């Protein structure tokens, strides 16, 4: 009996020893896996059975002032693949995708054959209907390993309306130009991700998974009115093409708030297909391009003189046929004998000579200070990348002739938006109001806060001086005396000013015989509500009155009617242009 009990005890000890040895082996192996070789095994697991998928955020919409969408994200899909399943038929699948989606065949083929991965993007931001058609064709051929995931597509329902302000998303899904680019951080939101385990090409239902939800972007409201923008663009297009011009811009401002109801450019483009447009047509000329404004600048000159009390609208000016100055001779655009004009007549007839003679009474430093206060030489700060500050030479550097030419709008450069805001100062009773393109507030990609809620104001000239300049500008649209009777609107008092300026050629760096023509005006003149500024570059013929005047008339009539602005009922006094 003892020997049997001893044998049993021995076997029990041996059994415990074997169990202990087995446990030790497992413990050592576990230590090796979790401690020494942990990262290698994690990487191996990730390569073989862990997939991370991007969950795209929904990009915020860009709307007009009334909430009408100009850019929005609509349902779309991405095509994705499991290369371990697509590799045998990669060539056939790549052919289908390249043919249907116009993507690079070899790039898709490379992704379908990618080693050591079970997830690859094949095509991004594909319209849902098209993506499903492609997937159905692939499956109908008996191929597997291709699937779809949600991927919003950017759509521009208004097409070219406001395109140069809105911008677009490029083929890589990156913001390019306009508001899309300048407000990309607030529009884009933050993408999320989903990480999960797979096995045999399928997701393991009870496997480890982690989801980080995407955060949608914020919407952006612009100040423009889509209807006004559409109409302004159509009038501008007709004006430029009929005049045989190269390009043009047109701006509509609310005189009291500085909000832009329209900022039109021609030529423009369709942001749904930006690749079909030339690079120069993708940005806003009205904001980025600088040019010499010509005679529209005369109203700023007169405003400074009147505010200083140096002249009155009835100041008498004797205008000779030509005016020798320094080593130059100044001419008017029309041939004439000696004229006896009032200062109102100088504006009505747009006399360069008369303007120069009047400007002799103001000091260079004082005149420069007024032009700076009107916004010349400085960006408006509307939040557009590449906005031009224009060119306003420091008065210390002026040559003897330079003040003369600046007084009638040569030798100084502006953007269309900059000049519109300057003339709007007169319409707004002498107070400059910073223009805005964003309704409310928004933060740009550079961290600057912009928008109508942050718009600043400053008094530039007295209310009396503003009224006097306005009266002089009304003479410009007078049927008998003015240079732009075609700008007059029946029933309304209209103040305006024509502009015709020589252009500097890109090749020679000199005046090359081409011109910029323009017209700026506001109505009702005695209670201003809107300002319209039209600019045409290099027309085949015509000046600011004959080219810009009719365009102004159409746009201003439209906006007055749309916003139900009634005539004031008063009648402009007959201008006294001669003495």
Image (tube, helix red, strand yellow):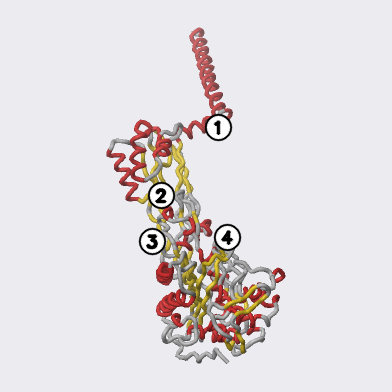
Q: Position of residue 44 (x, y in %)?
A: 49, 31
In primary-sequence order, the first of circles 4 and 2 is 2
In primary-sequence order, the first of circles 1 and 4 is 1
In primary-sequence order, the first of circles 3 and 2 is 2
Q: Are marks 1 and 4 in contact (CB under 8 Å)?
A: no
Q: Are marks 1 and 3 in contact (CB under 8 Å)?
A: no
Q: Position of residue 148 (x, y in %)?
A: 37, 44
Determine the residue positioned at 43% across, 42% down: 121
In primary-sequence order, the first of circles 1 and 3 is 1
Q: Are marks 4 and 2 in contact (CB under 8 Å)?
A: no
Q: Which mark is residue 430?
A: none
> Which type of secondary structure does the marked residue at label 2 adopt?
strand
> Which type of secondary structure does the marked residue at label 4 adopt?
loop
- The answer to whether residue 392 is seen in the rendering is yes
The residue labelled by disc 1 is: 39
Q: Is residue 123 left or right of residue 356?
A: left
The residue labelled by disc 3 is: 157
Q: Is residue 309 left or right of residue 65?
A: right
Closest to the camera, between mark 4 and mark 2, is 4
The residue labelled by disc 2 is: 125
Q: Are marks 4 and 3 in contact (CB under 8 Å)?
A: no
In primary-sequence order, the first of circles 4 and 3 is 3
The residue labelled by disc 4 is: 508
Determine the residue positioned at 50% across, 10% down: 7
Q: How far apart are the alpha carbons under marks 1 and 2?
A: 35 Å
Closest to the camera, between mark 1 and mark 2, is 2
Q: Position of residue 212 (x, y in %)?
A: 48, 48
Closest to the camera, between mark 1 and mark 3, is 3
């Amino acid at each position: 009996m003892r020997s049997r009990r001893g044998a049993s005890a021995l076997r029990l000890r041996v059994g415990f020893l074997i169990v202990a040895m087995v446990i030790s082996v497992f413990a050592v192996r576990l230590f090796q896996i979790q401690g020494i070789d942990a990262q290698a095994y994690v990487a191996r697991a990730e390569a073989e059975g862990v997939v991370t998928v991007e969950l795209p955020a929904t990009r915020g919409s860009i709307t007009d002032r009334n909430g009408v969408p100009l850019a929005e994200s609509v349902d779309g899909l991405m095509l994705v693949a499991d290369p371990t399943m697509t590799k045998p038929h990669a060539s056939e699948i790549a052919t289908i995708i390249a043919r249907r989606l116009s993507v690079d065949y070899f790039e898709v083929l490379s992704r379908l054959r990618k080693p050591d991965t079970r997830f690859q993007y094949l095509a991004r931001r594909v319209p849902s209907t098209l993506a499903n058609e492609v997937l159905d064709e692939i499956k109908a051929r008996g191929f597997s390993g291709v699937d779809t995931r949600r991927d919003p597509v950017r759509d521009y329902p208004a097409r070219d309306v406001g395109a140069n302000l809105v911008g677009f998303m490029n083929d890589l899904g990156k913001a390019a130009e306009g508001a899309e680019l300048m407000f990309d951080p607030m529009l884009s939101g933050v993408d999320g991700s989903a990480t999960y385990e797979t096995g045999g090409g399928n997701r393991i239902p009870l496997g480890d998974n982690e989801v980080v939800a995407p955060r949608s972007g914020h919407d952006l409201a612009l100040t423009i009115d889509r209807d006004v923008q559409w109409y302004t663009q159509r009038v501008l297009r007709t004006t430029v093409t009929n005049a045989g011009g190269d390009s043009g811009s047109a701006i509509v401002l609310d005189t009291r708030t500085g909000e832009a109801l329209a900022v039109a450019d021609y030529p423009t483009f369709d942001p749904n297909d930006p690749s079909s447009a030339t690079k120069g047509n993708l940005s806003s000329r009205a904001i980025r391009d600088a040019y010499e404004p010509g005679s529209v600048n005369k109203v700023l000159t007169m405003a400074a003189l009147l505010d200083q009390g140096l002249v009155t609208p009835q100041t008498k000016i004797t205008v000779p046929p030509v005016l020798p100055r320094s080593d130059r001779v100044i001419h008017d655009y029309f041939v004439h004998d000696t004229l006896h004009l009032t200062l109102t007549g100088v504006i009505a007839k747009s006399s360069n000579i008369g303007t120069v003679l009047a400007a002799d009474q103001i000091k260079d430093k004082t005149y420069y200070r007024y032009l700076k206060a009107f916004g010349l030489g400085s960006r408006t700060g509307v939040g557009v990348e590449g906005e031009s500050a224009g060119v306003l030479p420091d008065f210390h550097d002026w040559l003897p002739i330079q003040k003369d030419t600046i007084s009638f709008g040569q030798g100084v450069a502006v953007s269309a938006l900059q000049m519109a805001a300057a003339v709007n100062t007169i319409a707004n009773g002498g107070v400059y109001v910073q223009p805005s393109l964003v309704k409310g507030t928004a933060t740009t990609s550079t961290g600057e806060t912009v928008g109508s809620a942050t718009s600043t104001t400053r008094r530039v000239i007295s209310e009396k001086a503003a009224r006097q300049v306005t009266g002089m500008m009304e003479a410009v649209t007078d049927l008998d005396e003015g240079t732009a009777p075609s700008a007059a609107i029946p029933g309304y008092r209209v103040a305006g000013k024509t502009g015709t300026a020589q252009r500097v050629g890109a090749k020679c760096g000199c005046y090359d015989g081409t011109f910029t023509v323009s017209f700026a005006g506001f109505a009702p003149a005695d209670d201003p509500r809107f300002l319209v500024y039209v600019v045409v570059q290099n027309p085949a013929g015509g000046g600011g009155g004959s080219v810009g005047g009719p365009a102004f008339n159409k746009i201003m009539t439209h906006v007055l009617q749309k916003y139900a602005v009634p005539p004031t009922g008063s009648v402009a006094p007959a201008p006294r242009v001669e003495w």
